[in-house]
Image (cartoon, grey):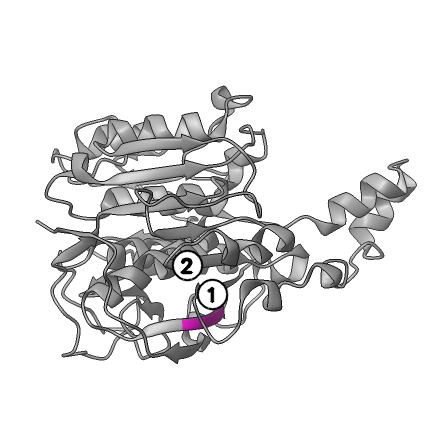
Amino acid sequence: MLGGVEVLGVPDAPLLVPLARARSLADTVVELGGTLSTTGNPLWPVAQIGTVPPPTDASSWQLTWQGWRGGVVPRHDARRLSDDAANPLAAAMAAAAAAAELFAWHASDHPMSGRRAAGFSLWNPGADWLAPDASEPELSYLPASLWLIGLGNLGQAFSWLLACLPYADRSKVELTLQDYDLIAASNDSTSLLSSLPLVGTKKTRVVASWLEAAGFKTALEERRFGPWTLRGPHDPAVAFCGVDNAPTRADLGTAKFELVVEAGLGAGPVGFRNFSLHTFPSSRRPDQIWRREAAGSAFDVSAMPAYSALRKSGLDTCGLAQLASRTVGVPFVGLIAAALAVSEPLRRLHGGSGVEIASGSALSLCDVECVRLPFSPYAFGHLPAL
């Protein structure tokens, strides 16, 4: 929201999750770029958190969550969940859904934005998130060790959400971080832990510093991921992958991980709000899904008006093709995809169903499609939740 975010009525309360160096909620809002205010702009839309007097004129959404479910309802919708502390990922999902609806409202690219409920169940993806679900368990177990491949939009969202989880002792959690790249100026607007002063710093160092400040243990792998990457006997058995290219994804099956959770974002000006999830082992190997010879078969957007204007301005064809092929990412889509991914080992730890494939869009969270599969009990190390 480049026009700014103003936050009203922030209490003088301690921060409950280590998402910032500040210790109070008010100081955290300022640290993360918001502005504390006492009066709202009547022309701005409103996202309501908690029980507050609703605005009379402005478009507004109520964030609400319960158990493993979270989302937003418009102000004319009286439905409300309990806003409990059972699973912090549900509150994060509500926040991401609010940002998605605000984005669609500003962009005017969906006729129902501002007029519909939008949310998601992390326990039962694809189910009605506002309906009671007696099968949702209390969050009791959390992964003890993880390997994060790719530390851009998705990798930083994985890290953000791991810090939200109620570990009794984060110093017992081992995280291996793998990326070879540097923070770029573009990461400032797409990735949760990036900012302009960090441009030129290795992504592994930035994310490790942030996670260690939150209490986690980290180990760094600063080579590219590929067929030469091999998990050792004492390395994490479970990997999260958030890279944006098919050749790297195709090699996920050769590193000897026991479980891989891969999240992806849509590409281009039409599909940038799309997200997907794959888990392995599954009915198909990674190299069967992401065939190297199919890497150039994406829809060609270079003839669209924006790219035609760039060509007329003098941008060469090579640069134009590279620009047109890049994945477009916005933080709220990455957060939705990451919440779905991080909830995968949590579901398996609590006896829920495994998801082989999931696909959806932040523009229509009620239409997520899933393929489920039977799986063995999670045997890759766990720690107790608070």
Q: Where is residue 278 in the image (x, y as percent from the top left)?
A: 47, 65
Which residues are drawn in magenta?
356-362
Q: In this view, does 195 lie above or below 341?
A: above
Q: In this view, does 234 lie above or below 337?
A: above
* Residue 130 figure quarter: bottom left
Residue situated in front as seen by the camera: 46 or 334: 334
Q: Is residue 345 above or below residue 40?
A: below
Q: Is residue 231 within the magenta segment?
A: no
Horizontally, residue 161 falls left or right of residue 245, namely: left
Q: In this view, does 69 lie above or below 321?
A: below
Q: Give the mark nearest the N terminus, 1 or 2.
A: 2
Residue 136 can be seen, yes or no: yes
Label 1 and label 2: CA atoms lie apart by 6 Å
Horizontally, residue 220 falls left or right of residue 167, namely: right
Q: Which amino acid does label 1 sit on?
A: His
* Residue 68 figure quarter: bottom left
Q: Residue furthest front?
A: 233
Q: Where is residue 205 in the image (x, y as percent from the top left)?
A: 42, 25
Residue 97 can be seen, yes or no: no
Residue situated in front as seen by the camera: 83 or 327: 327
Find residue 261 and name its label. 2
| SS label for mark 1 | strand
Q: Mark 1 sits on what residue?
A: 278
Find out whether the residues at labels 1 and 2 contact each other: C-beta distance under 8 Å.
Answer: yes
* Residue 97 figure quarter: bottom left
- At x 82%, y 39%, the residue is 319
The main secondary structure of the magenta stretch is strand
Q: Is residue 359 within the magenta segment?
A: yes
